[in-house]
Amino acid sequence: MESATVLAFMGLGGQEVFLVALFVLLFFGAKKIPELMRGLGQGINEFKNATKDVKENIEKSMEDPK
């Protein structure tokens, strides 16, 4: 999904996105933002891996009747 579509769906315009980005920059500081994004990325990857494992387990259990 494109980011413009997501932002339009959420009702956010350019000004709102700018204000949120400015608030994050002021609240966390420029040095902390890369660490936050790295942690967010690792969390998303872990969630994807866990979801994939659950899906594989479900599919495997449906293939092998006991």
Image (spheres, helix red, strand yellow):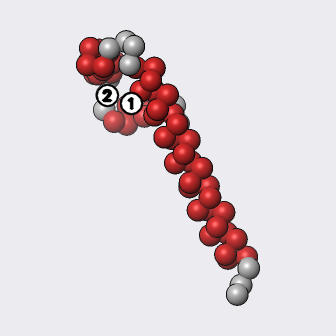
Label 2 sits on residue: 12
- Asked whether the viewer can see residue 47, the reply is yes
Of the numbered discs 1 and 2, the one sitting upstream in the chain is 1
User: At label 1, which amino acid type do we have?
Assistant: Leu
Task: Identify which residue is drawn at 38% across, 19% down.
Answer: 32
Name the image quarter holding the C terminus: bottom right
**Pointer 1 local density, CA inside 10 Å: few below 14, some 14–19, many at least 20:** some
Say if residue 15 shows up in the picture: no
Residue 46 figure quarter: top right
x, y percent for residue 20: 29, 22
Mark 2 neighbour density, 10 Å: few (under 14) some (14–19) many (20 or more): few
Q: Position of residue 25 (x, y in %)?
A: 32, 15
Name the element at disc 2: loop
Q: Residue at left 31%, top 32%? A: 11
Q: What residue would you read off at disc 1? A: 7
Task: Give the x, y percent position of residue 8.
Answer: 38, 31
Q: Which residue is drawn at 25% across and 19% down?
A: 27
Is residue 57 positioned above or below 31 on the image? below
Query: In the rendering, at what x and y percent does residue 60 appear?
Result: 70, 71
Left or right side of 48 for 63: right
